[in-house]
Image (spheres, grey):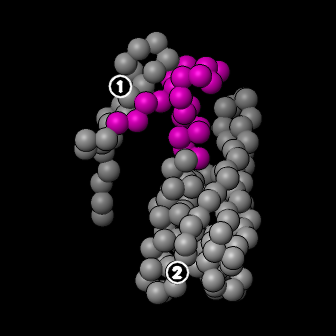
Amino acid sequence: MQDYTVDVARTSDGIADASVRSFHLTLGARRGALSLGFNPVETLLSALGSCLMTSLAMVSELSRVPITTMHMHLRGTRQDKPPVLVAVEYHLTVVTDLGRERVDRLIELAHKNSTVFQTLSGAVPISGTWDYDSSGS
């Protein structure tokens, strides 16, 4: 078992500060105020993308296969009443010399090893597409 702790404080009207160890993240904390920073849903989507790519990097290292870079675009669809995400979609681009089948297998393993993916996929449907660029650019 592993525990995680984060402190979050509303520091001013519409701003929240999250901190862990010596790191800080400023978040928008007023509904509809897009100029205040990442809102909570955008932060959740960022956590999902970061966790999936962290897991993908881990399984590629363990498999001794190189992945040069990764980029992910995520989209969450929210209904208003009750306010809940009803779908999350992502598109991942991987730069590697691996073939499609190897990339597919690594992404499958990344899903299984991503804490945030495993947690969220029990609550909201997550679908993903991916492609790979073998040109190294």
Please tell me which of labels 2 and 1 falls first in the chain: 1
On residue 9, which mark appears? 1
Quadrant position of residue 137: bottom right
- Between 1 and 30, the one lying in front of the other is 30
Measuring 40% from the left and 36% from the top, which residue is drawn there?
Answer: 25
| Quadrant showing the N terminus | bottom left
- Between 91 and 68, the one lying in front of the other is 68
Measuring 69% from the left and 31% from the top, which residue is drawn there?
Answer: 82
- Total numbered circles: 2
Instruction: Spot the residue most to the top.
Output: 13
Q: Is residue 122 visible?
A: no
Q: Looking at the picture, how far across and down is residue 50, in whole percent?
A: 51, 56
Q: Which amino acid, mark 2? A: Pro
Judge whether 76 appears above or below 51 on screen. Answer: above
What residue sits right under mark 2 in the picture?
A: 66
Q: Which amino acid, mark 1? A: Ala
Measuring 59% from the left and 64% from the top, which residue is drawn there?
Answer: 70
Measuring 38% from the left and 28% from the top, which residue is drawn there?
Answer: 17
Task: Please state which of the two labelled residues, at mark 2 or mark 1, is closer to the viewer.
Answer: 2
Left or right of residue 1: residue 44 = right
* Distance from the alpha carbon under mark 2 to that under mark 1: 40 Å
- Between 33 and 108, the one lying in front of the other is 33
Q: Is residue 117 visible?
A: yes
Q: Looking at the picture, how far across and down is residue 45, in whole percent?
A: 59, 47
Which stretch did the figure color magenta?
24-45
